[in-house]
Image (tube, grey):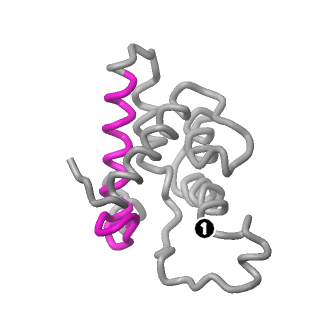
Amino acid sequence: MRSDGFRSSANHMQHGDVSVMKHSIRVAKTAIGLSHKLGIKVSERDLVRGALLHDYFGYDWHGKKVGLYEIIHFYKMHGFTHPGTALKNAERDFDLNNRQRDIIKKHMWPLTIKPPACREAWLVTMADKYCSLMETLRIHH
C-alpha cells in the first residue's frame, strides 16, 4: 500500500466517484468479510495482496472513446484487457505467488474465459462484482 504505483491509483477513477485505490481496498475488505462469513479457509495475505492489485492497470480507462475497431474487436476493450495489464504491472513491481497471479488474472471471470483456480480468486471475483455494482449505483457503505 506504500508503493508509488499503488498510491498513484488514487488518481484514477474506477466506478462513479470512487478511485481505483479505494475500490481495491473495498474489494479486499469485502473478500475478507465473505471468507469469514462463509467460513472459507483462505490465505488472507494472498487474498488481500491479490485484491489490492487486481486493478493495478495504471491508467484512466474512462477517457478512451470506443471506436468501430473496438466494437468489432470487443475483446480489446478495457473489461477484457485490464486483468492482463494489471498482472503485468504487478509482476513488474512486486514478487507474486501463483495464487496472487490467479486472483489478478481471473477477477473479471467470465470475461477472462478461464475461471479462477483458487478460493481466494473466487472470493475476490465475487467481491469485485459486488463492490463495482455498489459503486456504479453510488450505494457506498
Q: Residue at x 23, y 52 (%)?
A: 140
Nearer to the camera, 106 or 2? 106
Main SS of residues in magenta: helix
Query: Which quadrant of the structure image shows residue 106?
Result: top right
Whether 22 is drawn above or below 120: the answer is below
Task: Residue 65 in the image: state x and y as whole percent.
Answer: 58, 85
Whether residue 65 sits left or right of residue 38 in the image: it is right
Residue 12 lies in the magenta stretch: yes
Percent x, y for residue 12? Answer: 38, 72
Seen as rendered, the residue at the extreme left is 141
Look at 55% across and 38% down and name the residue there. Answer: 100
Q: Which region is colored magenta?
A: 9-35
Q: Amino acid at mark 1?
A: His
Residue 11 percent coordinates (x, y): 33, 73
> Which residue is the site of mark 1?
78
| Rendering coords of residue 133 (x, y %) | 40, 52
Is residue 43 positioned above or below 122 on the image?
A: above
Q: Quadrant of residue 67?
A: bottom right
